[in-house]
Amino acid sequence: MEVELTAPNGKKWSQPLGLFINNEFVKSSNEQKIASINPATEEEICSVFAATSSDVDSAVAAARKAFKDPSWKSLSGTERGALLTKLADLLAEHAETLATIECLDNGKPYSVALNENVPEVVNVLKYYAGYADKNFGQVIDAGPAKFAYTLKEPLGVCGQIIPWNYPLDMAAWKLGPALCCGNTVVLKLAEQTPLSMLYVARLIKEAGFPPGVVNLINGHGREAGTALVQHPQVDKVAFTGSTATGKEIMKMASATMKNITLETGGKSPLIVFEDADLDLAAKWSHIGIMSNQGQICTATSRILVQKKVYDDFIRRFKAKVEEISVVGDPFEENTFQGPQVTKAQYDRVLSYIKSGQEEGATIALGGKPAPQKGKGFFIAPTVFTDVKPSMKIFREEIFGPCVAVVQFETEEEAIELANDTTYGLGSALFTKDLVRAHRVAREIEAGMVWINSSNDSDFRIPFGGVKQSGIGRELGEAGLAPYCNTKAIHVNIGE
Ligand code: ADP
């Protein structure tokens, strides 16, 4: 049920391989497994049990039982908060091991996992720990004879499905508010990157969560994912992943009218106006598309630049990419960009690069594989210029270190181009004109706008999309609403 592993940085740990149900690791019912591959070396790290639909049944039954059990149900918000705080503290204690696992399994730089991802998880859990005894209803006066009070009730069993690009963060974004509100959870990990959260499973038990409150299962989307979404005993589904899968989930969830939260794809624009600080724009344009190997749903993957400063911006942007985007071994300290997560993603990004060339765009930088010692799913950071808005590289989500830059002449044209997409997740704009900044921010169809920045995310601030980028919000106070029901209790004190 576990295997001893040693990473290239010398870190050793005992890696759980089972499904975590009722606070125990168990095999899958038919003992099927999925191999986890190190994308930097293409070698297998280990094989992890993958849930069948009957395992999903067991996990949901455990969560359902735990939801009613006094060991969880009768806890006060303060007590639930204390459990979340304890889990956050344990995660902080195990930061180096968790960052090592994340680096190995996902390919992201160790320094990023250690200094950004693990702290983010700790912050999110502590934030929702704080909310656990501050999320209450109202008393509503309805005249001398009647009043009502409202209760914030948990929904029940939450089926949560996460992707592979931020295995720890995405789990925390979902577990934090769900547990804060008193729900129980079956969380399906992404089959490409299950290892870090299986390690966290042990910490969940150690923190003192009663059995069945948090169940973590690895498994294929088509098998375990669909079984979870369709399960009649699941009250809510929260999903982060592709728009295509989000649509399927929405359809499946309709059978029992489950409450859903979806955070899906994006093709977020970044607008550079001619009065912008071009060095600042180049810096954040780089961060906005090249961070996390370009595997970010909010990545600002379309850069729109006003004609007068187009050449100047391209020069500064290319210089920034060349200076900062060091591709290499994710365990090396100066590496900015590791490999794409899987061979499938690597092939997908390369096929988009090919399509950009075929449609007539110019590769201003990169555009090819960048293997390290002949191995790994590495791709050189790629900048396309001479892009037309009709091209696939401008319209479709690539999910890699690949950006399309176009020119515009007027503010109206920039807004039209920015909104000419089925997506609406992030967006960024660069200008020194305060009035224009706020005017354009209101016109962009997106869940988030960054003024003179890109891809800021903060546990205190709501995150989510409009149009086909999703439904509902995560993080911040807004992140609580999808996990509780407001019950109105009417009281008659008249006749
Ligand atoms: P990607 O293509 O980037 O892997 P997906 O949206 O397919 O993105 O995957 C995100 C998560 O959704 C993963 O945990 C995956 O296993 C799960 N998943 C994929 N297909 C389905 C499905 N049909 N039903 C439920 N979950 C799914």
Image (tube, rainbow, N blue to C red):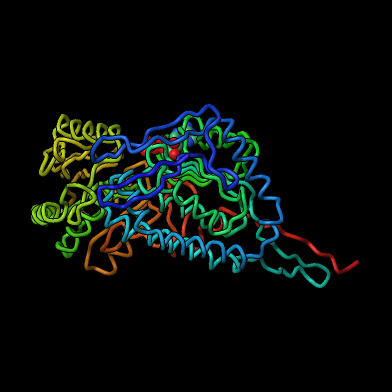
Whether residue 445 appears in this view of the structure is yes
493 lies above or below 297: below
Residue at the image point whose x is 58% and y is 58% from the top? 208
306 lies above or below 81: above
Residue at the image point whose x is 17% and y is 65% from the top? 277
Residue extending furthest toward the bottom: 144
Image mark count: 0
Residue at the image point whose x is 43% and y is 59% from the top? 91
Please state which of residues 448 and 67 is positioned toward the viewer in this rendering: 67
Q: In which quarter of the image is the C terminus?
A: bottom right
Whether residue 468 appears in this view of the structure is no
Please state which of residues 434 and 463 is positioned toward the viewer in this rendering: 463
* x then y, percent, for residue 387: 17, 40
> Taking 191 as reference, is 353 left or right?
left
> Taking 382 as reference, is 18 left or right?
right
* x then y, percent, for residue 96: 34, 58
Please state which of residues 322 and 96 is positioned toward the viewer in this rendering: 96
Residue at the image point whose x is 47% and y is 55% from the top? 474
> Taking 275 as reference, is 441 left or right?
right
Residue extending furthest toward the right: 495
